[in-house]
Image (tube, helix red, strand yellow):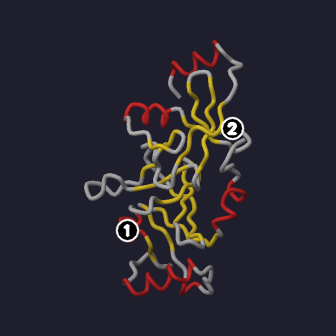
Amino acid sequence: MDEIVRQAMAKWPNVPAVHGWLALDRRGNWLIKGETISNAQINEFIARNYTHDEAGRWFFQNGPQRVFVELAYTPMVYGVPDYPQSNAILTHTRKSVQTVHAAWIDDEGTLLLETEHGVGHVHDQDLEWLLPSFVGADGGPLDEDSLEARLDGYAAGAVESEDGALWFQQAATRVKIGVIRARDVPAHFGFVNKPE
């Protein structure tokens, strides 16, 4: 959080919060009243001051005022924005992911990762760059047909055996991918999509 924001919070501690103005879309874009914010400096300021409260409501601390964020899906959006120069996974706030703690595929075929930054879904346009991270139980790569069959099984919620399971490999960490329903994600991870 920016020091100027901390100072404003201390100086004006009782500024009412704002709801219904700021949103995060599925591709990690900030929206004000439905319009994408295109100013890079504003996006960076929001990203640096984006956090959550104990109730799982995510907000942007704008000086002394909390601006609660409506989430299109998860509080983080993960991607590989610098591919092919780098295959590093970043949050939509440009924080580098060091460790993937867990992974899931929901019933819509969306990949979710839990990292040191919290839970987030992978940007749909960046999933292709992460396909080499999907491996079998032995950590070995999968051929295209095997990967497609396993992904179809996950999207259908039907991973019946270890033979049909997938693992997500990042550096030296490999985690088994679980199955989750999209509608269960907020409750499972303890966040609020639409703070009121």
User: Circle 2 is placed at which residue position?
Assistant: 53
* Residue closest to the far left: 85
Instruction: Say above or below: 108 vs 37.
Output: below
* Depth order, front residue of 195/140: 195
Instruction: Find the distance from the CA under tag 2 to the CA under tag 1.
Output: 33 Å
Q: Residue at x 52, y 67 (%)?
A: 110
Q: Residue at x 52, y 39 (%)?
A: 32
Quarter of the figure with residue 177: bottom right
Q: Amino acid at mark 1?
A: Glu
Q: Label 1: how many residues lie within 10 Å, few (<14), some (14-19) or many (20+)?
A: few
Q: Position of residue 160 (x, y in %)?
A: 63, 86
Q: Amino acid at mark 2?
A: Asp
Q: Residue at x 51, y 18 (%)?
A: 4
Instruction: Say above or below: 20 vs 13.
Output: below
Q: Which mark is residue 196?
A: none
* Depth order, front residue of 136/128: 128
Q: Position of residue 136 (x, y in %)?
A: 47, 79
User: Circle 1 is placed at which residue position?
Assistant: 128
Q: Residue at x 57, y 34 (%)?
A: 60
Instruction: Say above or below: 160 vs 128.
Output: below
* Depth order, front residue of 14/179: 14
Q: Label 2: how many residues lie within 10 Å, few (<14), some (14-19) or many (20+)?
A: few
